[in-house]
Image: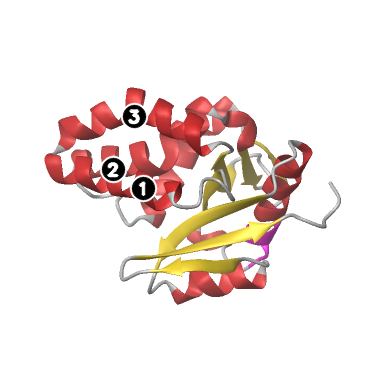
Amino acid sequence: MDAIRPYQEKDKERVRQICLKNADCQYAPDDTKKYILLMYCDYYIEQEPDNCFVAVDGNDNAVGYIICAENYEKYAKTFRELYLPQVDRISLKRFVDARLDLLSHSMFKNAYPAHFHIDIDEAYQRRGIGSLLVTALKLQLKKKKLSGMMLVCGADNQQAINFYEKNGFKTLLTTKVGRAMALDFDGEKA
């Protein structure tokens, strides 16, 4: 890994590949792939590319990313208008899942309007890249005067929970399906 840099349009397909691979969906049916990309990738890189960063190898190929929606209200409005109808065409179950995902972030929108997703190619994990990506996004959001950021990960994903705790995240809520975690920027300089 050579650097962390802002996302560029040329990174789109590689970011999408990493998203599918980390969701264990690279060989899934096309509808499943489309759902994963709509939910966890495409909005962010298409609508808020300035809040997206990639880790790149020596050939400037993305090997990991962090992608963010900085304002929940803006995200929810655009997602409902542009992406939710596409999810609805996949299946009713996926549509319901997408609505529940929107709700999981809305619970904390006042204190943490920014939420994010992060993935790193398996060959590049456990090298500190995730922490570098979190730092890059944190600095970007602090420049924009945001007070923190949050995410929801699997309630049983102990490896992810350990990573976020190591990077200063605190648990907001744990349910059977997910754990909401947040990082406060208060008291830190931009």
Vertical arrangement, residue 182 with respect to residue 30, above or below: below
- Badge 2 marks a residue whose secondary structure is helix
Q: Are marks 2 and 1 in contact (CB under 8 Å)?
A: yes
Q: Earlier in the sequence, mark 3 or mark 2?
A: 3
Of residue 63 and residue 180, the one placed in the foreground of this image is 180
Label 1 environment density (alpha carbons within 10 Å; few <14, some 14–19, many ≥20) = few
Q: Residue at x 53, y 48 (%)?
A: 116
Residue 185, x across and y down, in percent: 73, 54
The residue that label 1 is drawn on is 103
Task: Residue lying at the far right in this picture: please name it.
Answer: 189
- Position of 172 compared to 81: left or right? right
Q: Residue at x 13, y 40 (%)?
A: 92
Task: Reply above or below: 185 against 165.
Answer: above
Residue range of the region highlighted in magenta in the rendering: 127-132
Q: Looking at this view, name the residue that lies furthest to the left.
A: 92
From the top left corner, tell me how far across and down residue 35 is, in percent: 27, 40
Q: Which three-letter amino acid code belongs to the residue tagged 2?
A: Arg
| Kind of residue at disc 3 | Arg
Helix, strand or loop at disc 1? helix
Q: Looking at the image, is 48 positioned above or below residue 40?
A: above
| CA neighbours of label 2 inside 10 A, class few (<14), some (14 to 19), many (20+) | some
What residue is shown at x 69% (from left), y 43% (from top)?
146
The numbered disc on residue 80 is 3
Q: Quadrant of residue 43?
A: top left
